[in-house]
Image: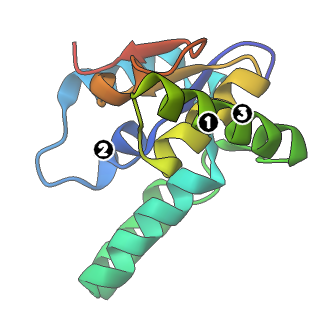
Amino acid sequence: MKTGYLLDTSVYSQPLRRRPVMTALSRWREAGDERCGISVVSVAEVEFGLHLEGREERHERYRELLVGRLEMIPTDERVWQDFAKRKARQQILGLPVSDLDLLIACCAVCHGLTVATLNARDFSRIEGCAWEDWSE
């Protein structure tokens, strides 16, 4: 993927929601799956929620709608090094964000992608991270 989006969990999980944010689904459709990727972090967050819920029909819906749909963007050594540096910077600035959101941001930055999110509050606080609010 040369240019595109890294879907935050808040966007990636929309097809599974009872009341999805339609603007997010529309923006995803407009961008196209070929220009969107996900981090293993988002996969883990969605699967955690499904395990917590414990309903097989929701797991089946996940497998039908999302598994294998998007390119998995690697969270490699370079991403983890950037994470360590940015986590320290966020704390020095007094603007901590969740580790998982920060890891998604680092993955996007290291791979030249823009984070597509419904969580503008946290991603707007991360220096150097390109992001778009797909709720608008």
Side (left or right) of 17 relative to 64: left
Residue 9, quarter of picture = top left
Estimate the x, y position of residue 13 in percent, counting from the top left. 36, 49
- Residue under numbered circle 1: 88
Disc 2 residue type (three-letter): Gln
Estimate the x, y position of residue 103 in percent, counting from the top left. 60, 43
- Residue under numbered circle 3: 85
Residue 124, quarter of picture = top left
- Element marked by disc 1: helix
Q: Which mark is residue 14?
A: 2
Residue furthest toward the front? 92
Q: Earlier in the sequence, mark 3 or mark 2?
A: 2
Side (left or right) of 90 relative to 56: right
| Nearer the observer, 26 or 132 | 132
Disc 1 residue type (three-letter): Ala
Image point (71%, 42%), residue name: 84
Tag 3 near tag 1, CB within 8 Å: yes
Image point (42%, 62%), residue name: 46
Residue furthest toward the left? 19
| Nearer the observer, 69 or 117 | 117
